[in-house]
Structures are given as structure tokens and as C-alpha cells.
Image (spheres, grey):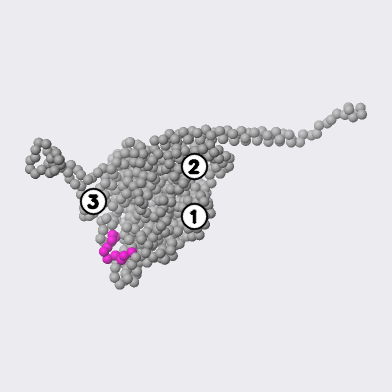
Amino acid sequence: MSKMRGRVLIPLPNTGAMGRKRNNFYMRSIFILALCIFGLLQYHNFNYLDSRDAMLSESITNDSVDAIMSMVPATLHKYLTPHTRNHSISAAGLQLNSSGSSLGGSGSGAATTISFEVYRPPNNTEIKRQIVRYNEMQLVLNEETFGPLQNDSVIIVVQVHTRINYLRHLIVSLAQARDISKSLLIFSHDFYDDDINDLVQQIDFCKVLQIFYPYSIQTHPHEFPGVDPNDCPRNIKKEQALISNCNNALYPDLYGHYREAKFTQTKHHWWWKANRVFNELEVTRFHTGLVLFLEEDHYVAEDFLYLLAMMQQRTKDLCPQCNILSLGTYLKTFNYYTYHSKTNKKSYASSLISSNSLLGSNRNNYNNNNNNNNNNNNRNSQQLTASSSALSSSTSLKNAKVYVGDTSDVDNNNNSNNNNKNKNNKIMNNKKTSHMNTVTATSNTNNNNNNNDNSNKNGAQTWNYHVLPSLYSVYQKVESMPWISSKHNMGFAFNRTTWTSIRRCARHFCSYDDYNWDWSLQHVSQQCLQRKLHAMIVKGPRVFHIGECGVHHKNKNCESNQVISKVQHVLRIARNSHQLFPRSLMMTVPSLIKKSKLRKGNGGWGDLRDHDLCLNMTMPTR
């Protein structure tokens, strides 16, 4: 027993288990502490953005004219203020007595001498004369102020019809863009209007040039390319057309219909405009830079030129195959994350732990919606979903947190099988409709048979927001993919090299039986170009579509400012969240994209007279 008491215990060799446990404990503690700090930062960030956004939105909670005007700098109000042309004071004398009745000869001393000259719009002959005059002069306004056009400057070409209200807001957005003074702004008109001309000629922030499409319906109301009295009615059968010997009876479109001038004009105008800018204008003779294409119902962000230049500089290393740069995306619903209650804030904060909530996950599931007239007539009622209504309501607006640096596609419904695979799917509004369905449908059977061929593969997109957006605003995400007419036809740019290759394929463009210029351009890419049209697309759009009505769609309230107000708020919050003017670009890999199939045209372009006119526009006149 004494020997047992005196035995000395020898410690076992150190295996490191305790050290590992201690290190694991430290690591867990540090990780938990980091999460706590991150959550605390998020909490303070929520409160800060809540108060800031509330202040930003406090005074503007509706889409009234006053609210729209208050979002625009006072110096630019002149572009939004209509100037009436109803009457102007003249030198001739007409005496009115105190009761307002006309007096012959000399009146009493109480009579007031005042006169009115009623404004009379120019007649067709005068309009044609003015168009020839403008096109021959090629007068560049403000050139003495901003200097001549540089070879690498951006040319912005705006296609204008008659929607002056939208054009006013486009001009306001252009006026606020950085480096706009270095650009040449070309307005291409297919309708001569003195009010529109006055508005354009009022621009003083950059060089301006007006060109006028000379073959418009306005100047040719009773002859081709307008509506000739002997033109075949749209829905007449070919057999009846041959009997009546109407114009172009032998050549209806793919669906048995005959031309409609109001639809063919847009394609003619776009093709004429592109040829005019690249091949006929003296000011652009040596231009080698980008030409950006816009329309009257677009709205641009203040950094659109800055970002376009950055994309052009990075093309060689980010996307060598890209020959088109796209700044616009059709985002008809704005999905704002709102958190009014503590529960929402907690659920949102808990989602921050996952990596997906930090950087977001982009879903590019493209829509395969069938076109039909009912869908297009109801698109405006469908587009304002529950998520977009958060902006229109003042309460949601105060809590909306916007990050315009990224967008994500939303899964879409398939109309053919009516399976709702995702209750959160949003239906995208189709930009173009089949010629079969643009006017009153006369044959439901024919429409149903042709819908599948004329489906528009537009993907719905909504805003996607990141955590602590200021941490991620140093870069802008872009992606590349083949140019898709229905997705990338808004706010896209290319240079003379790309145009030259397109122009060589004029016959494909001019003979393709589709009245849409963008679908015809995609046909050119697929069928003729050796180097297909490939686009670099900015994920956070810098060009927005604000038009409620147009050639294809008519709404009850075409003068609505609702979309304009939304875009103003999006850009204001983005500006104050430091989401504009990124320091660099980052290329992201898009999700799997289905190969674009060769599609049957939408029709409306079977008349050989349209083919010939289109081809004749390609002939250089310089």
C-alpha cells in the first residue's frame, strides 16, 4: 500500500485535442460576434434608409403634374411647359366693346383695341416643302456653343412620332445626363408638327439636328406609302382581291392579309433613319463612335453615357464577340421589398445569413407567352402587380429600398398548358404583336393557328435588391448573350462597322415578312450576318420605357404619368443610394439560355412595294 501511495503519475503525451477545442471555441465566438456586428449594422442601416427614404418621398407621393414637376430641376421646367399656339396677337385692329361684341367703324372711348390671329397648321404642300428644306440644310443647332462633333462622340438618335408628352420627359432626362454636351442629339420625325419642332429647337444643352422621314403617311395620305384608295383591304380574301384587281392582290402576307400603312411605316422609318445617319449626313461622314437608338417614350438615367463609355472600353476584355451594347430592359413591374413591421424586419434580417441574400440569385427563365389581342389590350391592367403597387402607395414608397445595380428575371406562366408552377410568377407584357392580331380579328381560327408561330419570347423582369447596397455599388454587373429583338431593342448602340455588315444584308431586312424592324433585324443576324449580333447588356437598366400607349397598345388614359413618376422615384432613390456611376464593370454568367429559333415572321410585309421602297432607301445619296 505504501508503494502505491508513493507512485508518481506520468502525464500522457499532448495530442492537441484541447488546443483544437480551444481554437474551435474561439472561431465560433468570433463568427457569432461577426454575425452580431453584421446584424447590428443591418439594423442601423434599415433605420437610416427608412428615415432617408421617408424624407425623400415625403413630399412626393402621387403622380400628379405638380409632383412630377417637383422632381425636375426648375431650369428644366421649360421643356415640360406647353406653349399654346391657338392665338397670337397681330397688328391688325379689331375693336371690341366692353361687352365683347364687335364694333364697326370707330367705337366709344370704352372700347379696347385688340386682335387675334388664329393659328393655322401648315397644309400638306407646306409640310413637304419644310421637310425638304430641313433635310437639305442639315442644320446642327448649338454647334457654335459646344463645338463640332468628335469622331468618337456618342450620337443619340431618337425616333419621334406624335407623343409630345413623353418626348418632353425624355428631353428632361437627357438634359440631366453627365457628358450630354459632348453628344449629338438627332431627332428623326415621321410627323411634322410645329409644337414638336419648337420643343426640339428649344434644347440648349447639346448639339441638335432634326431629320424628317420623307415618305410618311402624313405627306402621302392618299397614295403609297400611305393608303391608296385602290389598296386591297386588310382582310379581303386573295381570290376576291384578284377579282377586284386591287393593288398588290397577288402578294398578301404570310397569313393572307394585306398591308396596313400605319404598321409598315415604323419599319420604313427605322431603316431610313439608320441609313440617313450613317451614310448620308455630312456631320456624321467621318464618325466612328457609337450610335445609340432611343424612342420618344424612353427615359434615361443620368449616368447612361458614363456607363455606355465604360462598356465600350471594356468590350475587348469582357466580351470580344459583342457588337451591340444594350442599356435598356423592359421592366414593367417593380418589385419593391417593403418592411413596415418588426416582423418583416426580423424575417428579412434572418435571411441575410444565407449567401443568396447577399449577392442575389439571377433567374433567367424566358417567357414563351403566346401573342393574342386580348393579352395586349389588358396588359396595362396586368402589369401593376402587388409588388409594383408598393410604389404607388405612399406608405410603401416611404419604405421602398431600391438597388438598380441588378435585376433578376421572373419565372413566367406558360399560356399553352396553363400550369402555375410558381405563384410568384409575373406575366411579361409583349412588346410586339402578330400582324394577325393588331387590328380587329376576323378569323378566330386563323388567329389560333398562327399564335404559336408568333409567340414573343419576352422574359418578365423585376428589380432585385441587395443588402447594404453601398457596399456593392463599386461595380456594375453586365452579361452577354445573342441579341434578342424583343429584349434588347431599347436603348442599344452599335458603331459603323456593325452597321456596314447589317446594311450588306438589306435584302434580307427588306423582304422579311414582318412589319417589325427589330424582328427583321434579328432575322438578318440569324440568316445573313457572318458575325451574329451579340449584345453586352447592363443588368441595372439605364433606359426605361415610360409609354403607356403606342402603335400596338391603347389605354384608356394615354396621358397617365404613373410610369413616369415611378421611374423618377427609382432613379432618385438610386442616386441617393450611390448606385449610379459605378467604378468598374463585372461580367456575370447568365443562366442557360435557349437557342433562339428561326421564327416565322409576324406578317404585314408582303407588299412588294414595301420591299422596293425599303431597298431604295439603302442607295447612298451623299
The tag earlier along the polypeptide, 3 or 2, is: 3
Figure check: 44 above or below 565:
above
Type of residue at label 3?
Answer: Gln
Label 3 CA crowd tier, 10 Å (few <14, some 14–19, many 20+): some
Q: Which residue is disc 3 drawn over? A: 130
Q: Quadrant of the N terminus?
A: top right
> How many marks can you see?
3
Picture coordinates of residue 462, whole percent (x, y): 47, 47
Asked which secondary structure carries label 2, the reply is: loop
Label 1 CA crowd tier, 10 Å (few <14, some 14–19, many 20+): many
Q: Which residues are magenta?
A: 225-234
Picture coordinates of residue 50, whole percent (x, y): 47, 35
Specify the farthest residue to the front.
Answer: 99
Q: Which residue is disc 2 drawn over? A: 337
Identify the residue shown where x is 51% and y is 41%. Answer: 466
Query: Do tag 1 and tag 2 residues touch (Cβ < 8 Å)?
Result: no
Q: Which residue is disc 1 drawn over? A: 413
Inspect the magenta stretch and tell me whether residue 230 lies in it.
yes
